[in-house]
Image (cartoon, rainbow, N blue to C red):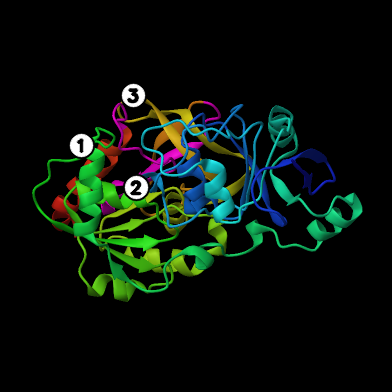
Amino acid sequence: MKKAILMLEDGKSFSGVSVAASGETIGQIVYNTADVGYQEIITDPTSKGLVICFAFPEIGNYGVNLKDNESEKIQCAGIVAKQISKVTSNWQATQGFIDFLKKQKIIAIERVDTRAIVRYIIKKGEMKCILSTIDFDLKSLRSKLKYSKNINDIDLVSTIATKKSYKWNLKNKLQLLNVFEKEKQYTKLSDNKKIFKVVAIDCGIKESFLRMFASCNCNVIVMPAKTKAEEILKIKPDGVFISNGPGNPEKLDFLVEEIKKVLGKKPILGIGLGHQLLALALGGKVYKMKSGHRCINHSIKNLDTGSVEVVSQNHGYAVLPDSFKKSKYRVKITHINLNDRTVEGIEAPLIKSFSVQYHPLARPGAHDAPFIFNKFIKNMKTFKDVK
């Protein structure tokens, strides 16, 4: 076993053992409390630039398969775990987790006190970190961190999103969708019969969201984050989706300005980063959380219905609840997090636009995705009445 080290920006270090690629990687240390879904988490473009500390005692035991990827490759900067399984035990697995990491040259360390790391992040907050299997000099590592970029100070979306517009390949993707439905791993979200044209602004979009739109009978045109509002409106979509993605929403002023030009002209749905961007376009504000929400089991409350849902989350920024007082769009908060009262959803009813902070799941037992996508479809159907 090869030695490895994790050093945080403030000098705190943790020793462990390397189980994948050799070398060094710098990112932002975060923790995720999920007990399953490690493949989806690390391939989610929202995880770009993050070194993820998995709080669950063991990950990797059911391997990986292509169907569960949220993008074409692993997006996180590195992985920290208590134990990464050397055994793969699942009938769907096409590859072991460690082999998956090695093939994509991802640095991962185990035999680390992950509970101590989680407690430290909660107390001190998320910060820059370095993972190394080649340099163990603490002074040297700290110097490298000092002169490295902070992911919160740069535009991560431009490094990960599509550079050209494209039509999502519905035919091929529906074949994959049918596999999910046959295996009862994917829930049909809507009985909508009408075909809608949806523009998806790619800030780091997850594959599962595109499958959800397919399930709702929507044709999706994916467009770059730097697309002008005029280009969006020119193709006459029925609605606009602002996707999830990584990083600081305040570094995306160019996109916020274009969203403002679409407000009131087309229904808008935002998820994750898209929620924060819509909030900024509506006149709200966002803030950096001390330690973000990265999990599959946070409870949120729908303030309109009083119902409570357990949802998946992956974000380090949140919307300020009192920042819409001067907004002309009469924005209302629709969902809150029951753990810390942070904003989980907003709506501007007059212009048929809304967003959620959490990531809806279209799996058996989950009710959040049908609610969100059916509401978006309803908004697209009725939008002509409010123009």
The label nearer to you, 2 versus 1, is: 1
Dot label at residue 208: 2
For residue 367, side relative to residue 290 (left or right): left
Instruction: First in sequence, mark 2 or 3: give its number.
Output: 2
Dot label at residue 182: 1
Whether residue 340 appears in magenta in the rendering, the answer is yes
Q: Residues within 10 Å of mark 2 (few under 14, many from 20)?
A: many
Viewer-closest of 147 and 95? 95
The CA distance from mark 3 to mark 1 is 30 Å
Instruction: First in sequence, mark 3 or 1: give its number.
Output: 1
Compared with 189, 66 (above or below) is: below
Q: Does any portion of residue 316 appear in the rendered image? A: no
Query: Looking at the picture, how far across and down is residue 161, in whole percent?
Result: 45, 65
For residue 118, side relative to residue 172 (left or right): right
The boundaries of the magenta stretch are 339-367
Residue marked by disc 3: 307
Secondary structure beneath label 3 = loop
The label nearer to you, 3 versus 1, is: 1
**Amino acid found under the numbered disc labelled 1:** Lys
Q: What residue is rendered at 14% in x and 51% in y?
A: 381
Query: Looking at the picture, how far across and down is residue 36, in whole percent?
Result: 48, 32
Dot label at residue 128: none
The CA distance from mark 2 to mark 1 is 16 Å
Secondary structure beneath label 1 = helix
The label nearer to you, 2 versus 3, is: 2
